[in-house]
Amino acid sequence: MKKVYGTAEQALDGLLRDGMLIAAGGFGLSGIPEFLIAAIRDAGTKDLTVASNNAGVDDFGLGVLLQTRQVKKMISSYVGENAEFMRQYLSGELELEFTPQGTLAERMRAGGSGIPGFYTKTGVGTQIAEGKEHKDFDGETYILERGIVADLAIVKAWKADDTGNLIFRKTARNFNPPAAMCGKICVAEVEEIVPRGSLDPDGIHLPGIYVHRLIQGDHEKRIEQRTTRKREEA
Amino acid sequence: MKKVYGTAEQALDGLLRDGMLIAAGGFGLSGIPEFLIAAIRDAGTKDLTVASNNAGVDDFGLGVLLQTRQVKKMISSYVGENAEFMRQYLSGELELEFTPQGTLAERMRAGGSGIPGFYTKTGVGTQIAEGKEHKDFDGETYILERGIVADLAIVKAWKADDTGNLIFRKTARNFNPPAAMCGKICVAEVEEIVPRGSLDPDGIHLPGIYVHRLIQGDHEKRIEQRTTRKREEA
Amino acid sequence: MANDIKGWDRNQMAARAAEELEDGWYVNLGIGIPTLVANYVGDKDITLQSENGMLGMGPFPFEGEEDPDLINAGKQTITELSRTSYFDSATSFGMIRGGKIAAAILGAMEVAENGDLANWMIPGKLVKGMGGAMDLVAGVRRVIVVMDHTNKAGESKLLKTCTLPLTGTGVVDRIITNLGVLDVAEGGLQLIETADGITEADIRAATEATIV
Amino acid sequence: MANDIKGWDRNQMAARAAEELEDGWYVNLGIGIPTLVANYVGDKDITLQSENGMLGMGPFPFEGEEDPDLINAGKQTITELSRTSYFDSATSFGMIRGGKIAAAILGAMEVAENGDLANWMIPGKLVKGMGGAMDLVAGVRRVIVVMDHTNKAGESKLLKTCTLPLTGTGVVDRIITNLGVLDVAEGGLQLIETADGITEADIRAATEATIV
């Protein structure tokens, strides 16, 4: 079972269809699957629903799929930092299912773990809770949130072996493991594919069972807010 | 905030009380908190409810707390391999809440993650489902399982730094992370405590936020079933 | 009831079960005969899960190389492979429950013609617990039972209705016994294959369940 | 409404908020003034969480050492410490929801006298999303709001009832403003402390919420 593909286009071959639900890893512009997003743009797949914490910025990350109007609906916790996202939402051109960040991460993990619903206190008493089942446990009120199962997950990791075992680097891990878990099919892009046996089996962040196809690329990894301190402050 | 203690007895000081709920890591005899179990035996704490996948063997692991009759109830998936456990259960001396292994692991993770209940297909139509809420999602029936929040978690890891960051070794990881998560207080025993900065921050299996107290010990690590092959088979 | 007919032995049953596995699959093998299936996967790229927290389970270690930190779900000492990854029990059963495991091959005490499975307790007699079996049968994509066709008393283990406490309802896809291979189908069991020297009549005689 | 009274500046508010933190705590700091609190923890052993997947957040990197794989929840480049650990978003919010984080220090648009908090949207005007704020206020053990006492129009941000969409209900424990410190108590807000040069009368004049 070869999992390694040559290009993002090849890795997505046969997986894209209009109206599908895609889960994407990344937080802000950190750890986003840049090549797979670009390949989806080039494929022109339409009416997408995308579950992703953010939507990149106007011209990078998922923002490019908003610019091309390929996205019908976002499931996200944060639309700031993307003027086009906010504009399309406020004008009603784009559906938006606001989901608290932790609820979104847990919905992905749950969907990938055979859990169709779970209860959380997050959002109780807010507009997020409207229309959701409420239930009391030990005298406290919780709402029912649903697991997300995506038709396709696109994620970005640091390294992979050829069996799809993934490791991530620092805070670029973020939503990538739960997004990968919730995909019926998961395609991963990594900075380096190493031979099996090169990664510490105790250090695998996401086992290859979750990863069906794999590409290697030279990532741009854009920085969204370059904050620094001067050396004399040290 | 010093987390490192000298002995298991010291690490448990002030934490034990009759009738409490303890979550314990380990699978079979692998990755069990041997020193903390021994210290609980020596403390004589009674009427314990213990959530643990197994109960060790007669004279090692949690089996020693069954021998001393300190356990009122077990929450477990498997009682085989421990004749005293099975005897006390069949004679009615010991309560036993049979919980499927995956449901037990998830109940611990949920309890530690602020999720009081989740739905699963596991056990639907079996005696495990009796008395539990049933709910349909997308045409399939699931049952509601509750998160476990333990008064105390006792776990065993391979290495720790002094801030309580833990790493485990091979399949000795098993129930230790979810058990640690679900404890209001978690005490860990490890084979080696290293200075902070010695462990790869990308390789921490359980962040120190889950670990309140820590001891180092020279573990026996008994093997339950020594299965081997001969060299000529290779 | 023909107690003298034998059909396949344990290793032949395991070899037959191995034919069920497809290249690239992640598979969970139960204790007993299912464990032997690993010996017959041949060139196929099969990754074995041990539900205590491992993908890529290797063979037993050489004598003297046993590691107490490396056991399978049957608590036996094992080894790792170049593809191996370790994870905790919550993650392990997340992949089971989430349908990421392509197939589980399990032993059974009883299977009913509707796919019900009983393999975890005999009330008042044998109470070991379900371990991970309830999670496996509820979660994996395909459940294959490997067991003797009849019990020690010569009675069919393929029943119209299970008499023992269930592990799961309607969960079994295929049953491989010493006498042959049967699928759970509409209205009963469907005979797929007979073991060497076994006739359909032998199987019908040894089976309480409806054979359609 | 006295627009000329000032009280604490941003750094003084942050310093006052830092006094709330206890040795050994794991703490989440929101964007804006809460971020400045890190500068005032002194000798206390405080571990900062960044909810995108990090415990042990360090200061901004030196120029030229920015790492796109190492950002905080505000998407700013940061650094790691010797205690740092990384994890995924599901684990990160598991610890938040599970009450493992001792305190969150957050900004706010409005706080009501019953502890309701609004800080994520102004309908039709500003819609950025709740990010992790709803999870934080629902999950962490103590929620401390740091904000100006009044808005740019000089109107109280401490209200009888919030007018904006809520982030959480009854979640705020303590409010630190430029004018002083108030707790959410039975029947309304309780004045704990006044800022330098501020009187109780000043605070009452600038507060719409009931002060008990």
Image (cartoon, coloured by chain):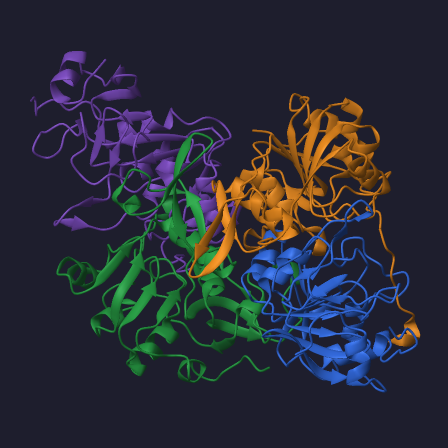
Chain colours: A green, B orange, C blue, D purple
Q: Residue at x 41, y 71 (%)?
A: A151
* Image height of A182 relative to B159, above or below: below
Quadrant assignment, res C42? bottom right
Query: Is B23 or D178 nearer to us in this picture?
Result: B23
In this rendering, the answer to whether D36 lies above or below C170 is above
Report the front residue among B54 and A63: B54
Where is residue A228 shown, x and y percent of the image? 34, 51
The N terminus of chain D - image quarter: top left
* Residue C81 position by quadrant: bottom right
Would you identify the image quadrant in which residue A2 lies?
bottom right
Along the line of sight, which residue is nearer the eye, D164 or C132? C132
Left or right placement of residue A126 versus residue B70 in this view: left
> What is the x, y in percent for residue D117?
26, 34
Is any atom of residue C196 visible in this view?
Answer: yes
The x and y percentages for residue C128 are: 78, 49
Placement of C52 over or under C202, stated as above or below: above
User: Percent x, y for residue B47?
Assistant: 71, 25
Is D74 on the left-hand or right-hand side of B198?
left
Q: Nearer the viewer, residue D188 or B63?
A: B63
Image quarter in which the C terminus of chain D is found: top left
Q: Report whether residue D72 is seen.
A: no
**Number of marks:** 0
